[in-house]
Image (cartoon, helix red, strand yellow):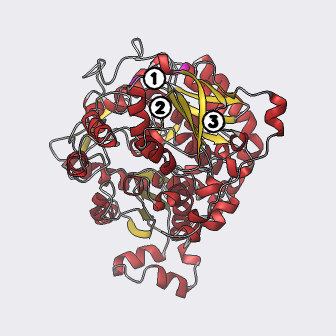
Amino acid sequence: MAAHSSIDAITRRIVERSKPHREAYLDRVQRAVAKGVHRSTLSCGNLAHGFAVCSPAEKAALAGDVVPNLGIITAYNDMLSAHQPYETFPQIIRDAAREAGGVAQVAGGVPAMCDGVTQGQPGMELSLFSRDAIAMAAGIGLSHNMFDAAVYLGICDKIVPGLVIAALTFGHLPAVFIPAGPMTSGLPNDEKSRIRQLYAEGKVGRAELLEAESKSYHGPGTCTFYGTANSNQMLMEIMGFHMPGASFVNPGTPLREALTREAAKRALAITALGNEFTPAGEMIDERSIVNGVVGLHATGGSTNHTLHLVAMARAAGIHLTWQDISELSDVVPLLARVYPNGLADVNHFHAAGGMGFLIKQLLKTGLLHDDVRTVFGQGLAAYTVEARLDDNGMVMREQSPEESGDAKVLTRIENPFQSNGGLKMLTGNFGKGVIKISAVKPERHVIEAPAIVFHDQQELQDAFKKGELNKDFVAVVRFQGPKANGMPELHRLTPPLGVLQDRGFKVALVTDGRMSGASGKVPAAIHVTPEASDGGPIAKIKDGDMIRLDAVNGTLEVLVDAAEFASRPLAEANLDDNEFGMGRELFAPFRRNVGPADSGASVFFG
């Protein structure tokens, strides 16, 4: 089906806006492709270092440029549940490459931190910047120019966006992303949330809280709620970086291993030495990026991707804006209910039909571009499938069902959960920000209340514990942007604000920090830019100022006389405590040079 008129118009606008940047990028990609990967032209010393640990047969093959060499970029570590399964993947990939007549080498490792461990801790101030550090680390691994293609082993919050930036920076190489899958279902997410709220109210102790958390996060794989990590996997499949049906297969299963083998062989098949050459920088275009945004809205995905998708697109010379994302949200219906937008987890989503069913529904009405290139070939319709094992243990694919396996989790396009994606850009005399309302009740989409200003999360926590917040108010939490302290996630705010909302108070959050994909039921205007540390209007807000957050009309206003507001001095904050400890001093150059949130909050794209 032809593209939906609004999808087509927004895509064309992005193409036109991006043209000079995209043309320059593609020119660089094509020049790199023309140079090729010619290992035989390396000096003998260079090449000897590059294949010193290979077998004699592999050395002979790599010396003559006659077989493809696959570079593995891995984010393995065994502290992160999502990345622990990657320990065994390099050997699986090497074996598969050998079967296909190629070679595979681990080109490099990249850091992978867990936001779940660092939430509310000093280490969280490194989290967003780790994305750009990951891109740089992957670039170092690929800089040896030994590889005809790359596979990327990464799954969680900043890791996949960082790896995509690297893959597109090395856009002359084919790139296949290999997921590890979600952990099996544990304690239901709504029950975990209930215990967290009881703990915030002092009704249960730390032992009960730890027991609930441990039953929820209990084994290998991604956390099962639909935050940034699982939004990443959806994106990689709908943008064509995954093999069809690969995203949400559990770790440690025969199908997961078969999909990994298949992905390795496919990466070798799409190199310049074969007949299906698919360089990543040419494969991903404006249509692919729009497909990613559409998928994000249709599934109620993470607000972190209003940063990451912008940065990922910029790496390919494509200029995506918050306005584009907001307008796409207006026309893309919500088709999935996965926690925090529902009670189900990603395993339930996968069992109900998963990505194959979702893509089929969106293609039916032209909400996705089918005419895209993917690592699997031409056309997104090839992804309307479910992956299975045949009798020989090989991957086979069946068409996804016409009906959802659970209409409360995943629904047809004719009967959406809501008519839009629930993610909007907000503009006004605050500057601009974003809000995700797919889990917020309609009666809370507009909040007007006096401001209470905080300069860190702990101030709000302390005020809550003292009983000072039992009233209608808008919490303005500032000096949390990328220049101030690296833009940490502020999830410690969710339980107390949720408690106050449940007590019947009108509450909302406005911040230049982040709230990720688990912002939940409290209306939260996040990523406000310009940030307080960059002279943004949020630095002029005073306690008692009336704030109006209107997610219906997309506005964020302080209801103060314009002349008075303009004349106010900017507040200042002592950020000395954010400068040192847990590695924060190493990232001072990032804080000095980072771009604004609406440009991706990156040191690469100002």
Residue 311 versus residue 548: which sits nearer the camera?
548
The residue pinned by badge 1 equals: 362
Q: Secondary structure at mark 3?
A: strand
Which residue, as the protein is rendered here, is positioned at the far bottom? 45
Query: How crowded is the residue under tag 1: few (<14 C-alpha within 10 Å), some, or many (20+)?
Result: many
Question: Image point 41% across, 78% down: which residue?
Answer: 60
Task: Specify the amino acid type for callout 2.
Answer: Gly
Tell me where residue 457 appears, x and y as whole percent.
50, 48
Is residue 173 visible to the viewer in this orientation of the structure? no
The answer to whether residue 187 is above or below residue 414 is below
Which residue, as the protein is rendered here, is positioned at the far left? 391
**Tag on residue 295?**
2
Task: Specify the amino acid type for callout 3.
Answer: Gly
Q: Is residue 170 magenta?
A: no
Is residue 586 visible to the viewer in this orientation of the structure? yes
Measure how far apart labels 2 and 3 are at the Cα level.
Answer: 21 Å
The residue pinned by badge 3 equals: 433
**Span of residues in magenta:** 331-336
The answer to whether residue 53 is above or below residue 270 is below
Total residue callouts? 3
